Structure formats: C-alpha cells, structure tokens
Image (cartoon, coloured by chain):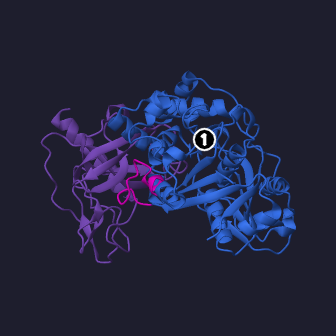
Chain colours: A purple, B blue
Amino acid sequence: MTAIAQQDGAAAALAAVERGAPVAAGAFTRPNDQGAIRLIGQRCRDCGARFFPGGRASCIRCYGAGLEAVELDDTGTVDCFTVVRQAPKGYHGPVPYVIGNVVLGGDVWVLAQLVGKDPEAWRCGEPVVACAFPLPRDAEHRGVALCYGFRPLAPGQGRLAAGRAA
Amino acid sequence: MSHAYIIGAGITKFAHHEDRSVESLAAEAIVMALADAGIGWGRVEQLYAAHVKQGVAAGQRVIKQVGPSGIPVLNVENCAAAGSTAVREASLAVRAGEFDVVVVAGFEKMEPGLLSVFPAADPRVVMGMTVLPMRFALMGAKHMHEYGTTIEQFARISVKNHEHAVHNPNAQYPKCVSLQQVLESRMICDPITVLQCSPTSDGAAAVVICSESFLRKHGAGRAVRVVASGLTSDSDEQAHNVHTLELMERASRHAYERAGVAPEDVDVAETHDCFTVSEVISYEALGLCAKGDGGRLVDERATWIGGRIPVNPSGGLLARGHPLGATGVAQICELVTQLRGEAGARQVEGARIGLAANTGMWSCCVTLLAKAG
C-alpha cells in the first residue's frame, strides 16, 4: 500500500469512528489520527493484577477492593481466533468476521474482533495493535457504535502516547 | 450424611413439539418418573423445577398439572447446567435429612435459531461476541494449534453420537450422519459446522430422589445411588483458563474426591457435547485421557459403545437434543437406564459407575452415580 492510500484509509476510518459513540463508556481512550486506542482496564493496588474490562468491585486475583483505572498496552499477541460465519442476534456488521483472544503485556486477556485483514489470513501468535472501528447498532444502520478491536501491527509501528478517555 | 437414591426416571421424546405446552411436557416426564418409582404424587415433598427461558415461576405452572398439593417448588436457573444443579441440590437436601422423597423436573421449549442468552444492552451484542459456539470454537482452535487435533477428530464426535442415538427412541435425531456430511455442512464458527452444534429442542426429563430410610421401606429394586457431585462456576476469561474447560476439571476433581472414585473407574459417561469440541476437551477435563490426547481417544474409538469408556450412549446433546433445562436431568436419566442394565441396543455392558458432566454459561456440574447394592 502506498503512503497516500494509507493516509486516505486512515482518514476514512477516522471519519467513521468520529460518528459513533463508544460501545462501552470509559472502555478505551480517544482514537488518535490513525484510529489507534488504548483499552482502559483496572489494576489492583495490592497485588498488581491488571484486567479488562474494568468496572469491577474487586480484584480478580486477590479480591482486594483497592482498584484503579489503568491504560493497558496498545500492542499484544493473538493467542487464538475463530472466523464467525453466522451472525448472532443483535449483530449488524459485516459477516464473516474474526473474534480473537488477545494477550496484552503477557497478562491481560481481551476478547475482541480482529479487523483490517482478510478473515482467512489471521494466524495464532500474530502481533496486533488496539484500534477503534465502527459497527452498526441496528439493522437499518441508523446508529453507529465505536467499538474496540485489534488490527495487524505494521512493522516498525511505535507505541502510542497515552491518550485521554473517549 | 446418609445417601440419596434415584428410584424413578422419566423422559419425553425430544423434538420440536409445536402443539405441546412446556407444562404438559414436564408433567408427562414427572408422571412417567413416578410410575417408574411406583409411588404417587402425594408422597412428594418438594419439586425442583429446572429451566432457563420458560418465564417466571414456571415450576408453579407445571405443578398445577400434576397435583396442587401445596408442596414447595424451587425454580432452578443455571443456564444449561440447570438440570444437574437441581439434581445436586435435591440430593443434598435429601442427604441432609430434610426430605424423604423429592422430584426434579427439567424442561424447556426453545425458539429456533442461534440461542441468545445475553441482555440486549450488553456491549458484546453489538460487537458480535455473543455467538454461542464462539468460546468452543476458540477452545477448538487452541487445541488444534497446541496439540495438532484435527477438524476430522472433532467432526467424528457428531458421527458417533448420531450413531448412538439410532438406538434411543427419545432422541431428536436418531439417524446416522457421515463424516463427510458433518464436514461439508454449513460452517458456523471455524472449525464448528452446523452438524457439530446441538439443535434447538423441546422436551422434559424427571427423576424421583429418595432417602436411605425411604428406600429401606420401599425396597431397593432398581435404585441408583447418587454417589457425589461437584459444581463450579466461572465468569472471567482471564481469572480462569477458558481454553481447557478448567471449570469441568475442578468440578470432576471435587466429585471424584468426594466419591473416592478415580476416572478409570467410570464405566459410562454422558458429557455436555453442546458442540463437538466440548466433548473432546471434556475427555481431558474429566481425566478420561491425558491433556492433549482427546483427539487420539476419538481415533481409537474408545468412546463409542463397545469401546474402553463409552461417552454419550444416548446420542448426547448433538443427537438426543438439547432442551436447555432438561439436558442435565436427561443425562442422569440415561445413566440410570444404563446402570439398571435396561438400555437395550445401546447398553454399555457391565456398567456400574456412571458420570454426567453438564455445563452452562459458565457453570459445570459433574455427578457420579452407581448401581445400588
């Protein structure tokens, strides 16, 4: 892909994502101009466990209540994935689509869509970067939800500066 | 604590019963179970009603049909593990000396199409993450990646269970399917094709459970002992390893320890084959083979009737059908029939110890049963 095509793609993606409200409040930072985000999870002040999604009353490991919101690593690895070829009720996006289990920083497991690539081309162990992408909220595409997911990590792509909550 | 015994079992045909109410299906199973036990409804002290999407207080609607005796009704919802959870709770109450005779009925009438169990406002709905085979598809993908398990090994579970169901008059799909048919059927979630998914079903199953002292008066006859059970619940993909049915591993370990029974002592098992992948991985979780050897067990035909450890002689969820609330009780009914030696053409010869593993989102109940006497 040429640099210009890349820029056009990013601009189009940004235009789309700016139309929608986040699918879950406080789940990720505001997308940068490349559509990249950081997921916001929780961290336990006592034992250091990090997890996603946040919004929980106590730690998943030590059950302590001292939790704080934390921006998670923007890059991770696909542990495994499946191509979904029949959409469940309430999903109005493109089919087939890919759901993957992604590991961030070796300790946080996130289940989300893998986007930005032919569904057949994904492999276990691939590096990915967190991103925002739009999905329709209803069959008539009247509303758009800004969703979190992961896309292939381009070679040489650096880490993001921390953003602010979307 | 004293023991609890199953003295009666009843099950309806699993099918699409368009012309029947769920209450009449449940009542049919209860009446059959009572007749099998040789006792009347008047002896029953509590009804445990297991169901998932049958509305508020469905057990109270059912009891109207079998006799408004005023006994307590306990409605049990634990997703697809509701049936076995209810059997466990009933057995514990009987063992604790609270009741002499109780009935557990599991029942369900389902809507066609992919099952939907998430609230509409859950953000995962819009993101397409509520498709039910997804978790098992991910488990299967991981198993293939780590252990070299093949799509064919998963698909053969459907071939086996349909073959078993041919001899079960209550099965929804008592007909053979070929490996090619399973593989070539519509792909739902890689590697799970539609013939590797349990169907939507209507049906009911019931058991009569009694105390040791009641059994002495009543006569042991064809009684089956509830030896032990284990129930676990998970909800977090990070806190628990969701790629290995860890919750089933923990539930079975608990049941084995309580019973003083080892996996190699089990003669026949009914496991939760909601999808083919879950049966293969359950072999490992239940200790029927080593981690990663599930596919090999399939190749060795060890889990066919006549094999080392027959699994799902009833046809399982895939071919007997899967009316959510009824499934766990149906598994127990099949084991009771097997342990009594009354399973006819699908009989597992010499079966003395049976194991049922029933999962729902995300709970697992493992029950061990043994021939009484």
Q: Considering the image in quadrants, where does the C terminus of chain B appear?
A: bottom right
Task: Determine the residue positioned at 24% across, 60% down.
Answer: A72
A2 w.r.t. B123: above or below: above
Does A119 appear above or below B45? above
Q: Nearer the viewer, residue A55 or B154?
A: B154
The chain letter for the residue carrying disc 1 is B
Magenta segment: does it hold B109?
no
Q: Which residue is mark 1?
A: B198
Residue at 38% over, 42% down: B291
- Residue B111 in sight in this render: no
- Say whether residue B24 is visible: yes
What residue span does the magenta drawing correspond to? B235-250
Q: Is residue A124 above or below residue B68?
A: above
Location of residue A94 in the rendering, given as x and y in whole percent from the top left corner: 44, 40
Outermost residue to the bottom: A65
Relative side of A7 to B133, left or right: left
Q: Quadrant of the N terminus of chain B?
A: bottom right
Q: Residue furthest front?
A: B373
Residue B311 falls in image quadrant: top right
Mark 1 secondary-structure assignment: loop
Q: Position of residue B326 (x, y in %)?
A: 68, 53
Main SS, magenta residues: loop
- Name the spot of residue A129 as percent of width and height, x first: 24, 48
* Residue drawn at (44%, 37%) of the image: B294
Q: Toward which corner of the image does residue B250 lie, by quadrant?
A: bottom left
Of residue B199 and residue B160, the one placed in the foreground of this image is B160
Q: Is residue B239 magenta?
A: yes
**Where in the figure is residue A41, as x and y percent of width and height?**
30, 64
Looking at the image, residue A149 sits to the left or right of residue B371; the answer is left
The kind of residue tagged 1 is: Ser
